Every structure is written in structure tokens, then in C-alpha cells.
Amino acid sequence: MELAQKRVLITGASRGIGEALAHAFAGAGATVALVARTEGLLRTLAVELGGSAHIADLSDPGQVATLIDRVEDEVGPIDVLVNNAGIDNSTGALLTRPTTICEK
């Protein structure tokens, strides 16, 4: 897939796998829209890569509902979604049904 001029939305982008993917997509010529819960590392990465930073807690349905609209208003229609955000649930996420995790 040719990535030049593509718009890529990456959740969980401020560190780890999300950060590495942001570097890879930006290095291939894509415009990256980066999403994380906290601002500091995310803004630094967005500036470094020439992308945009969007603060959102994806465990909050209200924030999820507006995220895509905010991103597309800024960068245009999303071509690729990398849904890398993690959910920190210390109550045993592996033993919980996915719908229950999303509701927390």
C-alpha cells in the first residue's frame, strides 16, 4: 500500500508500539493524527513528525463520539485506523467480556 498522502489515525500513540507505528507511517509519507489520553509526550511526537495531536480517553464514549469528527475536520478523511489504545483495568481484564471492558 502506498502511504504517501494517506491520513492515518493512531490511538495509543504517545509511546511504545503506537509511537513506533507513528514514526513508521510518517516516515513512509503519511499524515499522522495521533491520539492519547495525556498531552505531554503526544504533542512532542506530533511536532517531531509533522502530525496532529488529539487528546481523548477512549474509555469515555462521549470523547470517542467526537474524536473522528475533530480529526477529520483537521486533516481530512481518515484512510487508515490503527486502534492501539490500551485499557488499564486492574480488575482482571482477561476475565471480563469485551463489552464490559468497553463500558468501563
Image (cartoon, rainbow, N blue to C red):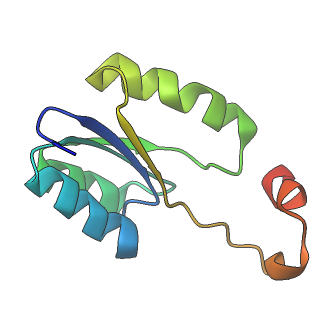
Q: Residue at x 16, y 42 (%)?
A: 2
- Residue 36 position in % (x across, y down): 46, 54
Residue 63 visible at all: yes
Quarter residue 70 falls in? top left
- Residue 89 position in % (x across, y down): 76, 73
Does 103 appear above or below 72? below
Q: Would residue 50 be found to the left or right of residue 92 on screen?
A: left
Q: Would residue 90 be found to the left or right of residue 36 on screen?
A: right
Q: Residue at x 60, y 49 (%)?
A: 57
User: Which quarter shows the N terminus?
Assistant: top left
User: Which quarter shows the C terminus?
Assistant: bottom right
Q: Nearer the viewer, residue 13 or 99?
A: 99
The number of numbered discs placed on residues in the rendered structure image is 0
- Residue 26 position in % (x across, y down): 15, 51
Q: Nearer the viewer, residue 99 or 42?
A: 99
Does 16 appear above or below 63? below
